Amino acid sequence: MRIADFISKEAITINIKSTTKKDIIQELVGPLVKARKLKKDAGEKAVKALMDREKRGTTGIGQGVAIPHAKLDKIKGAVLALGCSAKGVEFNALDGEAVHVIFLLLSSKDDKEGIHLKLLAKIARSLKDKFFRSSLKEAKTSEEALSFIEREE
């Protein structure tokens, strides 16, 4: 399983503009709707599901990383969005530090193959690598970030 198989350059946001967790999540879900990876009504439900998940505990796992994730009815398989911020954003991370790399994962509630957990594990493993994190953090374009993900897998 490759991260690159679930993300497109349209779903990568460099220099996140938002400053609150909800706005950041909306900023990352928007390109998924625009790229037709999610239907518009599924986009609204995705934001709600992701925020409900955040209420149970932050997905800001530390070391400048967050992996907000949720399962939805109106989605087939799984999709990823990536947000990068060189300066960092507040995401209530466990270590209290600013977040620079955010992988947003949405998958089907009917996930019989365990794609959701496999992708979460793959992303978490990849982001343990300091070089991987810093390369995404410093990416100047979505094409550059995607190219880096493809090369590193």
Image (cartoon, helix red, strand yellow):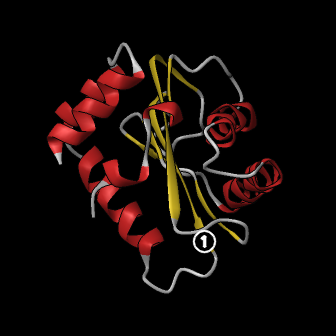
**Residue 113: percent from left, percent from top:** 43, 83
Relative to 56, say whether 51 is above or below: above
- Say which of 98 and 95 sits in front: 98
Relative to 112, say whether 26 is above or below: above
Q: Is residue 94 left or right of residue 106?
A: left
Relative to 139, say whether 129 is above or below: below
**Residue 6: percent from left, percent from top:** 42, 53
Q: Residue drawn at (77%, 56%), measured in percent from left and top? A: 42
Q: Residue drawn at (30%, 22%), measured in percent from left and top? A: 144
Q: Residue drawn at (40%, 33%), measured in percent from left and top? A: 64
Q: Secondary structure at mark 1?
A: strand
Q: Is residue 34 left or right of residue 65?
A: right
Amino acid carrying mark 1 in the image:
Ser
Relative to 105, say whether 92 is above or below: above
Quadrant of res 19: top right
Residue that carries the numbered disc 1 in the rendered image: 108
Quadrant of res 71: bottom right
**Residue 21: percent from left, percent from top:** 69, 36
**Residue 87: percent from left, percent from top:** 46, 13
Q: Is residue 146 left or right of residue 28?
A: left
- Say which of 2 and 25 sits in front: 2
Outermost residue, front side: 36
